[in-house]
């Protein structure tokens, strides 16, 4: 849980806060610095709508797995084409798909770990962290 964050029971507000404050969204804050309030609201609305689709934490965890796979596939393509710093110059479909996958990846993981205390997700994330070191 993040200090000074709104309640996770209000996903629109919580996700908008994440976009403005969490280190995971630093690159997005650079890209959308001109109107971060509007951008964070759009991301909050999008992610809240996605979260509403999954009432059960196990269903959310399954969706998180699918989003993780999509995110990884997109990252392979993006890295082969100049990396994230070049994302704004790539095909808008790729850029939009990556942004949506990234938002869901970060938010779903945050909800599974910090709100639902979903042990399987916690174990997978910890294992992935160890593997990356």
Image: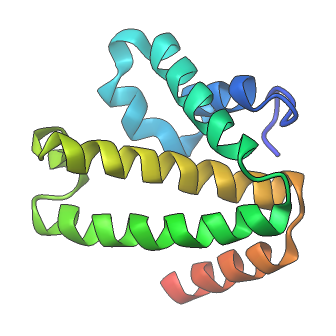
Q: Report whether residue 133 is seen.
A: no
Tell me if residue 121 comes above or below residue 10 in the rendering: below
Residue depicted at x 36% and y 18%: 33
* Identity of the residue furthest to the front in this view: 53
Where, by quadrant of the figure, is residue 31 drawn? Answer: top left
Residue depicted at x 69% and y 81%: 124
Q: Position of residue 87 (x, y in %)?
A: 20, 46
Q: Is residue 101 left or right of residue 49?
A: left
Tell me if residue 43 comes above or below residue 103 in the rendering: above
Q: Nearer the viewer, residue 56 or 126?
A: 56
Residue depicted at x 51% and y 22%: 42
Judging from the image, the colouring scheme is rainbow
Q: Is residue 45 left or right of residue 98?
A: right
Q: Nearer the viewer, residue 95 or 34?
A: 95
Q: Position of residue 73 (x, y in %)?
A: 32, 72
Residue depicted at x 83% and y 62%: 57
Q: Is residue 8 left or right of residue 90?
A: right
Tell me if residue 55 comes above or below residue 35 in the rendering: below
Q: Position of residue 6 (x, y in %)?
A: 82, 26
Task: Count every numbered label the image shows and give the total.
Answer: 0
Q: Position of residue 98 (x, y in %)?
A: 34, 51
Tell me if residue 18 comes above or below residue 90 in the rendering: above
Q: Report whether residue 122 is seen.
A: yes
């Amino acid at each position: 849980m993040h200090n000074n964050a709104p309640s996770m029971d209000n996903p629109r507000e919580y996700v908008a806060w994440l976009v403005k404050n969490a280190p995971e969204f630093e690159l997005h804050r650079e890209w959308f610095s001109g109107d971060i309030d509007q951008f964070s609201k759009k991301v909050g609305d999008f992610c809240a709508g996605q979260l509403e689709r999954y009432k059960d934490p196990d269903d959310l965890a399954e969706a998180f797995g699918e989003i993780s796979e999509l995110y990884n596939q997109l990252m392979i393509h993006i890295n082969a084409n100049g990396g994230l710093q070049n994302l704004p110059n790539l095909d808008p479909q790729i850029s939009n798909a990556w942004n949506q996958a990234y938002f869901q990846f970060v938010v779903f993981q945050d909800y599974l770990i910090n709100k639902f205390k979903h042990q399987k997700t916690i174990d997978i994330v910890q294992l992935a962290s160890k593997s990356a070191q």
